[in-house]
Amino acid sequence: METIQTNRLDRGFFRYQKEFEDKALKVLRSGWYILGKEVSAFEEEYAAFTGSKHCVGVASGLDALILAFRALGIGEGDEVIVQANTYIASVMGITINGATPVFVEPDGFYQADADLIEERITDRTRAVLVVHLYGQAAGMDRITDICRRHGLKLVEDCAQSHGAGFRGRMSGTFGDIGCFSFYPSKNIGAFGDAGCIVTDDEGIAGRIRVLRNYGSEKRYHNEVVGMNSRLDEIQAGLLRVRLKHAKELNSEKQALAERYDREIDNPLLTLPKKRESCDHIYHQYVIRCKKRDELRKYLEEQGIMTIIHYPIPPHLSEAYGYLGYGKGSFPVTESYADTVLSIPMYNGLTDEEQSRVIDCLNRFGRS
Ligand SMILES: *Cc1c(COP(=O)(O)O)cnc(C)c1O
Protein backbone atom coordinates (compact mmCIF):
# COMPACT_ATOMS: atom_id res chain seq x y z
CA MET A 1 0.00 0.00 0.00
CA GLU A 2 1.22 3.46 -0.83
CA THR A 3 2.47 5.55 2.07
CA ILE A 4 0.28 8.50 2.98
CA GLN A 5 2.58 11.47 3.39
CA THR A 6 2.06 14.43 5.72
CA ASN A 7 1.71 16.66 2.67
CA ARG A 8 1.62 16.34 -1.10
CA LEU A 9 2.60 19.66 -2.62
CA ASP A 10 2.66 18.08 -6.08
CA ARG A 11 -1.11 17.60 -5.93
CA GLY A 12 -1.56 21.30 -5.22
CA PHE A 13 0.48 22.05 -8.31
CA PHE A 14 -1.15 19.62 -10.72
CA ARG A 15 -4.66 20.77 -9.84
CA TYR A 16 -3.94 24.13 -11.50
CA GLN A 17 -0.98 23.05 -13.59
CA LYS A 18 -1.88 24.99 -16.72
CA GLU A 19 -2.51 28.24 -14.88
CA PHE A 20 0.77 27.96 -12.97
CA GLU A 21 2.79 27.07 -16.05
CA ASP A 22 1.26 29.84 -18.14
CA LYS A 23 2.01 32.37 -15.45
CA ALA A 24 5.58 31.19 -14.90
CA LEU A 25 6.28 31.33 -18.63
CA LYS A 26 4.75 34.77 -18.90
CA VAL A 27 7.04 36.11 -16.17
CA LEU A 28 10.11 34.34 -17.56
CA ARG A 29 9.47 35.86 -20.98
CA SER A 30 8.76 39.34 -19.61
CA GLY A 31 12.38 40.12 -18.77
CA TRP A 32 11.32 41.72 -15.45
CA TYR A 33 11.94 39.62 -12.34
CA ILE A 34 12.01 41.73 -9.19
CA LEU A 35 9.38 44.21 -7.91
CA GLY A 36 7.26 44.60 -10.99
CA LYS A 37 3.68 44.32 -12.15
CA GLU A 38 3.02 40.89 -10.66
CA VAL A 39 4.15 42.03 -7.21
CA SER A 40 2.03 45.19 -7.35
CA ALA A 41 -1.00 43.26 -8.58
CA PHE A 42 -0.54 40.60 -5.93
CA GLU A 43 -0.21 43.24 -3.21
CA GLU A 44 -3.43 44.85 -4.33
CA GLU A 45 -5.29 41.56 -4.53
CA TYR A 46 -4.01 40.30 -1.21
CA ALA A 47 -4.91 43.55 0.55
CA ALA A 48 -8.44 43.15 -0.85
CA PHE A 49 -8.57 39.47 0.18
CA THR A 50 -7.83 40.37 3.80
CA GLY A 51 -9.76 43.61 3.81
CA SER A 52 -6.68 45.72 4.54
CA LYS A 53 -5.70 48.99 2.95
CA HIS A 54 -2.11 48.00 2.21
CA CYS A 55 -0.08 44.88 1.53
CA VAL A 56 3.69 44.79 1.09
CA GLY A 57 5.31 41.66 -0.31
CA VAL A 58 8.50 40.45 1.37
CA ALA A 59 10.80 37.47 1.07
CA SER A 60 9.43 35.23 3.86
CA GLY A 61 7.18 35.03 6.87
CA LEU A 62 10.10 35.52 9.21
CA ASP A 63 11.10 38.68 7.35
CA ALA A 64 7.51 39.94 7.62
CA LEU A 65 7.75 39.58 11.41
CA ILE A 66 11.21 41.13 11.62
CA LEU A 67 10.17 44.09 9.49
CA ALA A 68 6.91 44.52 11.40
CA PHE A 69 8.62 45.04 14.75
CA ARG A 70 11.30 47.12 13.11
CA ALA A 71 8.71 49.40 11.49
CA LEU A 72 7.02 49.82 14.88
CA GLY A 73 10.34 50.85 16.43
CA ILE A 74 10.42 47.89 18.80
CA GLY A 75 13.89 46.70 19.78
CA GLU A 76 16.47 46.67 22.56
CA GLY A 77 14.92 46.99 26.03
CA ASP A 78 11.39 46.33 24.83
CA GLU A 79 9.24 43.34 25.69
CA VAL A 80 6.76 41.59 23.43
CA ILE A 81 4.19 39.14 24.80
CA VAL A 82 3.76 35.98 22.71
CA GLN A 83 2.34 32.51 23.31
CA ALA A 84 4.93 29.94 24.37
CA ASN A 85 3.58 27.22 22.04
CA THR A 86 4.47 28.66 18.68
CA TYR A 87 6.79 28.06 15.79
CA ILE A 88 10.19 29.49 16.67
CA ALA A 89 10.02 32.04 13.83
CA SER A 90 7.41 34.02 15.79
CA VAL A 91 9.96 34.44 18.58
CA MET A 92 12.86 35.16 16.23
CA GLY A 93 10.89 38.02 14.69
CA ILE A 94 11.03 39.61 18.14
CA THR A 95 14.56 38.76 19.20
CA ILE A 96 16.33 39.56 15.93
CA ASN A 97 15.28 43.13 16.65
CA GLY A 98 16.89 42.93 20.10
CA ALA A 99 13.58 42.83 21.96
CA THR A 100 12.69 40.25 24.62
CA PRO A 101 9.89 37.70 24.23
CA VAL A 102 7.65 37.29 27.27
CA PHE A 103 5.80 33.99 27.01
CA VAL A 104 2.23 33.16 27.96
CA GLU A 105 0.64 29.75 28.11
CA PRO A 106 -1.95 28.73 25.53
CA ASP A 107 -5.58 27.87 26.18
CA GLY A 108 -7.40 24.74 25.01
CA PHE A 109 -7.60 26.14 21.48
CA TYR A 110 -3.79 26.41 21.22
CA GLN A 111 -4.00 30.22 21.23
CA ALA A 112 -2.55 32.64 23.77
CA ASP A 113 -4.68 32.47 26.91
CA ALA A 114 -6.12 35.98 27.07
CA ASP A 115 -6.55 35.68 30.86
CA LEU A 116 -2.79 35.41 31.25
CA ILE A 117 -1.70 38.24 28.98
CA GLU A 118 -2.47 41.05 31.37
CA GLU A 119 -0.41 39.55 34.21
CA ARG A 120 2.64 39.60 32.00
CA ILE A 121 2.51 43.30 31.16
CA THR A 122 5.35 45.37 32.63
CA ASP A 123 6.45 48.95 32.02
CA ARG A 124 8.69 47.63 29.24
CA THR A 125 5.94 45.83 27.34
CA ARG A 126 5.47 47.40 23.93
CA ALA A 127 3.47 44.87 21.95
CA VAL A 128 1.53 41.62 21.85
CA LEU A 129 2.20 39.14 19.07
CA VAL A 130 -0.85 36.96 18.45
CA VAL A 131 -0.30 33.69 16.58
CA HIS A 132 -3.35 32.20 14.89
CA LEU A 133 -1.83 28.77 15.34
CA TYR A 134 -2.84 25.77 13.21
CA GLY A 135 -5.27 27.91 11.21
CA GLN A 136 -7.78 28.91 13.87
CA ALA A 137 -8.20 32.64 14.36
CA ALA A 138 -7.69 33.68 17.97
CA GLY A 139 -10.54 35.28 19.92
CA MET A 140 -9.56 38.82 19.09
CA ASP A 141 -12.11 40.80 21.11
CA ARG A 142 -10.36 40.38 24.46
CA ILE A 143 -6.87 40.74 23.04
CA THR A 144 -7.57 43.95 21.14
CA ASP A 145 -9.25 45.29 24.27
CA ILE A 146 -6.18 44.52 26.41
CA CYS A 147 -3.88 46.18 23.86
CA ARG A 148 -6.08 49.25 23.66
CA ARG A 149 -6.32 49.66 27.43
CA HIS A 150 -2.57 49.30 27.92
CA GLY A 151 -1.46 51.25 24.87
CA LEU A 152 0.29 48.23 23.32
CA LYS A 153 0.95 47.57 19.66
CA LEU A 154 -0.65 44.45 18.26
CA VAL A 155 1.07 42.31 15.63
CA GLU A 156 -0.53 39.16 14.21
CA ASP A 157 1.42 36.14 13.01
CA CYS A 158 -0.91 34.86 10.26
CA ALA A 159 1.55 32.39 8.75
CA GLN A 160 -1.04 29.65 9.35
CA SER A 161 -4.29 31.59 9.05
CA HIS A 162 -4.74 32.84 5.46
CA GLY A 163 -8.42 33.57 5.19
CA ALA A 164 -9.34 32.66 8.77
CA GLY A 165 -11.41 35.33 10.48
CA PHE A 166 -12.98 36.26 13.78
CA ARG A 167 -16.59 37.40 13.64
CA GLY A 168 -16.34 37.85 9.90
CA ARG A 169 -13.19 39.94 10.00
CA MET A 170 -9.94 38.50 8.66
CA SER A 171 -6.96 37.62 10.80
CA GLY A 172 -4.23 40.13 10.14
CA THR A 173 -6.55 43.14 10.31
CA PHE A 174 -7.14 43.46 14.06
CA GLY A 175 -3.82 44.93 15.03
CA ASP A 176 -1.24 47.29 13.61
CA ILE A 177 0.34 44.74 11.26
CA GLY A 178 -0.55 41.25 10.03
CA CYS A 179 2.37 39.05 8.95
CA PHE A 180 1.93 36.26 6.42
CA SER A 181 4.18 33.49 5.17
CA PHE A 182 3.67 31.86 1.79
CA TYR A 183 6.06 28.99 2.43
CA PRO A 184 4.94 26.20 0.05
CA SER A 185 3.06 24.15 2.68
CA LYS A 186 0.97 27.05 4.01
CA ASN A 187 -2.69 27.32 3.05
CA ILE A 188 -1.69 29.86 0.42
CA GLY A 189 1.73 28.69 -0.68
CA ALA A 190 4.31 29.89 -3.16
CA PHE A 191 6.86 27.71 -4.98
CA GLY A 192 9.71 28.94 -2.86
CA ASP A 193 9.98 31.41 -0.01
CA ALA A 194 7.65 34.39 0.14
CA GLY A 195 5.71 36.50 2.64
CA CYS A 196 3.91 39.78 3.13
CA ILE A 197 2.57 42.21 5.67
CA VAL A 198 -0.84 43.84 5.66
CA THR A 199 -1.75 47.06 7.44
CA ASP A 200 -4.20 49.93 7.32
CA ASP A 201 -1.45 52.39 8.26
CA GLU A 202 0.08 54.08 5.26
CA GLY A 203 3.14 55.16 7.24
CA ILE A 204 3.91 51.59 8.31
CA ALA A 205 3.39 50.26 4.77
CA GLY A 206 5.76 52.94 3.44
CA ARG A 207 8.43 52.17 6.04
CA ILE A 208 8.32 48.46 5.23
CA ARG A 209 8.51 49.16 1.51
CA VAL A 210 11.70 51.11 2.17
CA LEU A 211 13.14 48.58 4.62
CA ARG A 212 12.60 45.60 2.30
CA ASN A 213 14.70 47.28 -0.38
CA TYR A 214 17.98 48.32 1.27
CA GLY A 215 16.29 51.22 3.02
CA SER A 216 15.78 53.03 -0.22
CA GLU A 217 12.73 54.42 -1.93
CA LYS A 218 14.64 56.12 -4.67
CA ARG A 219 17.40 54.10 -6.28
CA TYR A 220 20.82 54.64 -4.64
CA HIS A 221 19.33 56.99 -2.04
CA ASN A 222 19.44 55.04 1.19
CA GLU A 223 17.55 56.58 4.09
CA VAL A 224 18.07 53.79 6.62
CA VAL A 225 19.91 50.49 6.86
CA GLY A 226 17.42 48.08 5.36
CA MET A 227 17.39 44.52 4.12
CA ASN A 228 17.02 42.72 0.85
CA SER A 229 13.63 41.18 1.47
CA ARG A 230 11.78 41.53 -1.79
CA LEU A 231 9.07 39.33 -3.20
CA ASP A 232 10.04 38.28 -6.69
CA GLU A 233 7.85 38.40 -9.79
CA ILE A 234 7.58 34.66 -10.34
CA GLN A 235 6.45 33.96 -6.78
CA ALA A 236 4.03 36.89 -6.87
CA GLY A 237 2.56 35.70 -10.17
CA LEU A 238 2.16 32.13 -8.92
CA LEU A 239 0.66 33.41 -5.67
CA ARG A 240 -1.96 35.31 -7.68
CA VAL A 241 -3.03 32.00 -9.19
CA ARG A 242 -3.18 30.37 -5.76
CA LEU A 243 -5.08 33.32 -4.31
CA LYS A 244 -7.76 33.01 -6.98
CA HIS A 245 -8.50 29.52 -5.65
CA ALA A 246 -7.92 30.22 -1.96
CA LYS A 247 -11.57 29.92 -0.94
CA GLU A 248 -12.06 26.52 -2.55
CA LEU A 249 -8.73 25.27 -1.18
CA ASN A 250 -9.67 26.33 2.36
CA SER A 251 -13.17 24.83 2.00
CA GLU A 252 -11.70 21.53 0.92
CA LYS A 253 -9.54 21.41 4.05
CA GLN A 254 -12.52 22.35 6.21
CA ALA A 255 -14.49 19.46 4.71
CA LEU A 256 -11.62 17.07 5.45
CA ALA A 257 -11.57 18.37 9.03
CA GLU A 258 -15.32 17.87 9.41
CA ARG A 259 -14.94 14.27 8.36
CA TYR A 260 -12.13 13.73 10.87
CA ASP A 261 -14.29 15.38 13.54
CA ARG A 262 -17.20 13.12 12.71
CA GLU A 263 -15.46 9.82 12.24
CA ILE A 264 -12.54 9.69 14.65
CA ASP A 265 -14.02 8.20 17.80
CA ASN A 266 -11.07 6.81 19.73
CA PRO A 267 -11.30 7.93 23.38
CA LEU A 268 -7.50 7.95 23.59
CA LEU A 269 -7.43 10.94 21.20
CA THR A 270 -8.32 14.59 21.80
CA LEU A 271 -9.57 16.30 18.66
CA PRO A 272 -9.14 20.01 17.88
CA LYS A 273 -11.73 22.28 19.46
CA LYS A 274 -13.40 25.06 17.55
CA ARG A 275 -14.02 28.34 19.31
CA GLU A 276 -17.24 30.18 18.58
CA SER A 277 -16.92 32.96 16.00
CA CYS A 278 -13.35 31.92 15.15
CA ASP A 279 -12.90 30.47 11.66
CA HIS A 280 -10.58 27.53 11.35
CA ILE A 281 -8.88 26.87 8.00
CA TYR A 282 -7.01 23.81 9.29
CA HIS A 283 -3.50 24.64 8.26
CA GLN A 284 -2.94 21.60 10.44
CA TYR A 285 -5.33 19.11 12.00
CA VAL A 286 -3.75 18.59 15.38
CA ILE A 287 -4.84 15.85 17.75
CA ARG A 288 -3.45 15.01 21.18
CA CYS A 289 -2.65 11.63 22.68
CA LYS A 290 -0.93 10.72 25.95
CA LYS A 291 0.77 7.85 24.11
CA ARG A 292 1.69 10.12 21.23
CA ASP A 293 5.02 8.51 20.35
CA GLU A 294 3.48 5.04 20.39
CA LEU A 295 0.62 6.26 18.21
CA ARG A 296 3.02 7.85 15.77
CA LYS A 297 5.00 4.64 15.45
CA TYR A 298 1.81 2.61 15.01
CA LEU A 299 0.62 4.90 12.21
CA GLU A 300 3.99 4.81 10.52
CA GLU A 301 3.93 1.00 10.52
CA GLN A 302 0.61 1.24 8.69
CA GLY A 303 2.12 3.60 6.13
CA ILE A 304 0.72 6.83 7.54
CA MET A 305 3.15 9.64 8.17
CA THR A 306 2.55 12.32 10.79
CA ILE A 307 4.42 15.33 12.11
CA ILE A 308 4.74 17.14 15.43
CA HIS A 309 4.07 20.87 15.60
CA TYR A 310 6.25 21.43 17.59
CA PRO A 311 8.35 18.97 19.60
CA ILE A 312 10.55 21.57 21.34
CA PRO A 313 8.93 24.82 22.49
CA PRO A 314 11.06 27.92 21.81
CA HIS A 315 11.80 28.51 25.51
CA LEU A 316 13.48 25.09 25.71
CA SER A 317 15.38 25.41 22.43
CA GLU A 318 19.12 25.82 22.43
CA ALA A 319 18.75 29.13 20.63
CA TYR A 320 16.88 30.61 23.59
CA GLY A 321 18.93 29.06 26.36
CA TYR A 322 20.09 32.60 27.15
CA LEU A 323 16.58 33.52 28.33
CA GLY A 324 17.16 31.17 31.25
CA TYR A 325 14.02 29.06 31.17
CA GLY A 326 14.08 25.39 32.09
CA LYS A 327 11.75 22.43 31.91
CA GLY A 328 8.62 23.21 33.89
CA SER A 329 8.62 26.95 33.08
CA PHE A 330 5.52 26.57 30.89
CA PRO A 331 3.87 23.26 31.78
CA VAL A 332 0.85 23.57 29.48
CA THR A 333 3.06 24.34 26.49
CA GLU A 334 5.41 21.52 27.41
CA SER A 335 2.59 19.02 27.78
CA TYR A 336 1.30 20.01 24.33
CA ALA A 337 4.77 19.51 22.91
CA ASP A 338 4.73 15.98 24.33
CA THR A 339 1.24 15.04 23.14
CA VAL A 340 0.32 16.88 19.91
CA LEU A 341 0.32 15.15 16.55
CA SER A 342 -0.59 16.57 13.13
CA ILE A 343 -2.28 14.00 10.93
CA PRO A 344 -2.46 14.17 7.11
CA MET A 345 -4.41 17.32 6.13
CA TYR A 346 -3.71 18.72 2.72
CA ASN A 347 -5.42 19.66 -0.50
CA GLY A 348 -5.74 16.58 -2.63
CA LEU A 349 -5.97 14.05 0.22
CA THR A 350 -8.35 11.46 -1.24
CA ASP A 351 -11.40 9.86 0.41
CA GLU A 352 -9.68 6.49 0.42
CA GLU A 353 -6.56 7.88 2.03
CA GLN A 354 -8.58 9.68 4.64
CA SER A 355 -10.53 6.48 5.36
CA ARG A 356 -7.26 4.66 5.98
CA VAL A 357 -6.10 7.37 8.39
CA ILE A 358 -9.41 7.30 10.27
CA ASP A 359 -9.55 3.49 10.50
CA CYS A 360 -6.03 3.36 11.78
CA LEU A 361 -6.59 6.05 14.39
CA ASN A 362 -9.74 4.31 15.59
CA ARG A 363 -7.95 0.97 15.89
CA PHE A 364 -5.07 2.34 17.94
CA GLY A 365 -4.93 0.87 21.43
CA ARG A 366 -8.08 -1.20 20.91
CA SER A 367 -6.91 -4.33 19.15
C1 LIG B 1 5.81 29.24 8.74
C2 LIG B 1 5.71 30.12 9.93
C3 LIG B 1 6.50 31.28 10.08
C4 LIG B 1 7.67 31.58 9.19
O1 LIG B 1 7.41 31.69 7.86
P1 LIG B 1 8.62 31.48 6.81
O2 LIG B 1 8.02 31.96 5.54
O3 LIG B 1 8.96 30.05 6.82
O4 LIG B 1 9.75 32.35 7.25
C5 LIG B 1 6.26 32.10 11.15
N1 LIG B 1 5.31 31.82 12.06
C6 LIG B 1 4.55 30.71 11.98
C7 LIG B 1 3.50 30.48 13.02
C8 LIG B 1 4.73 29.82 10.92
O5 LIG B 1 3.98 28.73 10.85
Image (spheres, grey):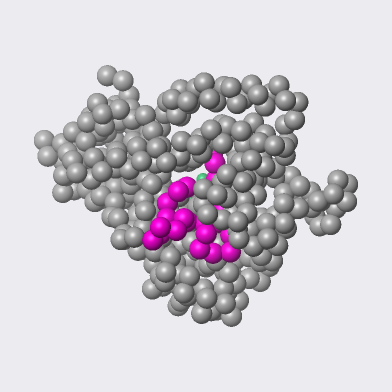
Residue 98, horizontal then vertical, whole percent? 66, 63
State the residue lying farthest toward the right.
220
Residue 42, horizontal then vertical, whole percent? 61, 41
Q: Residue 341 magenta-drawn?
A: no
Question: In the picture, residue 142 is in which quadrant?
Answer: bottom left
Q: Considering the image in quadrants, where does the C terminus appear?
A: top left
Q: What residue span does the magenta drawing correspond to? A: 162-184
Question: In the picture, residue 108 is in which quadrant?
Answer: bottom left
Give the side of residue 248 with respect to residue 87, left or right: left
Residue 144, horizontal then vertical, whole percent? 48, 70
State the residue lying farthest toward the left.
367
Residue at the spot 36% in from the left edge and 41% down from the top edge: 251
State the residue lying farthest toward the top.
1
Residue 279, horizontal then vertical, whole percent? 37, 53
Can residue 7 be spotted in the picture? yes
Question: In the picture, residue 205 is in which quadrant?
Answer: bottom right
Q: Nearer the viewer, residue 120 or 13?
A: 13
